[in-house]
Amino acid sequence: MITNLRKVSRAETGRIWRLALLTCVIFIAALQHANAQKIKFRFKTDTALLNLRKKLFVEDSLMKKGIMQDQDTKKNYFTGYNYKTLYDWDQYFESIVQLYMGKPSTCIINGVTIFLDHQRADGLIVRAVPENRKRNEHVKPFLCQIALLVFDNYHETAWLNEFYFQRLQKYLDYWLIQMDGDQNGLSEWMSAPHTGMDNQHERAGWWFDRKSEGVDLNCYLVKELRAFATIAERSGKKNVAHIYRLKADRKAELIRTRLWDEKTGFFYDHQYKGNALISVKSIAGFAPLWAGIASKKQARRIIYDQLMNPQEFWSTWPVPALARSEPGYSETLLKDDLGCSWRANTWIPTNYMLYHSLKYYGYHELASIIAFKTHELLKKSGNREYYHSESGTGVGLDPFWGWSLLGHFFLYEDKSSFDITRFSRDGINLNLQ
């Protein structure tokens, strides 16, 4: 009798615990759903943002010129370029602009799927649409991060089906295998234009030189691998997520150790098929902060010895694409330069990455200064493609309605506790010593 009562008691206890656990699960799920809904409608209800949008009616009108259609897929996309080209990393920053401006998700999603629709059998995706068939440079690693902007802010996930998931994995593997020629864990740029910093050939070479294991490239890849792992995790592919998170961790450690120069206190590109760093001080060297890879000690040195140093990166209108100490620091194109100039010039997207990098590492006041200076630069010279770092004069396309419009939202972000650049398990570890 007593034994039977004890058995009943244990069984009943088990049911109570299971019921309590289920109740907790339901409560947590409901809370997460409520928080998701809160974030989902944030950009429709945030008073500060709505008021800011009203002031940006000129920019809103300009953006309408950026809606184009891909002739192959018949999908509409957004680009800041009046010559209609859809570029790779531009899309990440332009997606944030579209989101803040209250635009629908359609062109952001299409910006990802158009690239994936153009993928070749070996995984390569040419970095511009329409593609330049003479220059088969692989698309920069931002597609997964753009996908997460849609997931986390529009809460639309069904579009990234198994077909596109497999293509994302294949495009990442191309970076990790075909674009890591010596399989040392650090992928290579094909040229300076491939970096997006068209004329920084001192560090990345000319067409097809493939001389540089780019510090910026490998940092982008760390963030992209972690973004892909997050997508895989949310898709129920836990094993895939684990594998790609490990790949990100290994690459992060290589960057932190092999691309760091203790003497100068900065990160540099590394020679492909060589044993030395390429000692050109480019804004690319701040990318380990953007990816949350640098230790706190490394971050302090970079910020105090490089960023805040007027002999290096602290220009009249910070932050220039090259350090002031570099021989190539010039507001005009040098002999044999091509494309846009990434020398004594300030670009909004790199300022944006650096702004958030400073916030990640706790340098909030300095981040606010970058936000203010960037906003003032647009007030001074308007919506331009880029700006001279000394005079603040606007350069390039005029007017420009692409990623530079992000500069209008720096001060809004600086007053907000919400960080659109962060995603769950993005690997930014502020406990790094």
Image: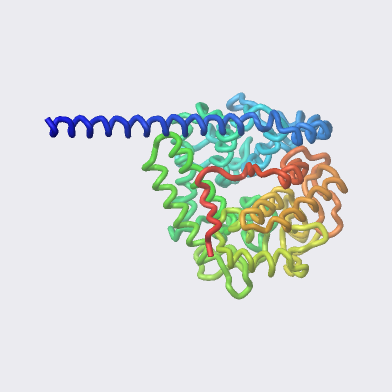
Question: Along the horizontal axis of the image, is 428 left or right of 329?
Answer: left
Residue 381 location in percent, x, y? 86, 47
Q: Nearer the viewer, residue 262 or 236?
A: 236
238 over 270 or under it: above or below: above
Name the image quarter holding residue 289.
bottom right
Residue 59 location in percent, x, y? 80, 34
Q: Please report the residue visible at 83 percent of the width from the left and 34 percent of the height from the top.
A: 55
Q: Which colouring convention does the figure follow?
A: rainbow
Q: Nearer the viewer, residue 120 or 428?
A: 428
Q: Residue furthest front?
A: 2
Q: Please report the residue visible at 80 percent of the width from the left and 53 percent of the height from the top.
A: 373
Residue 116 location in percent, x, y? 53, 35
Q: Please report the residue visible at 58 percent of the width from the left and 73 percent of the height from the top.
A: 262
Residue 16 location in percent, x, y? 32, 31
Residue 190 visible from this viewpoint:
no
- For the image, the number of numbered tags is 0
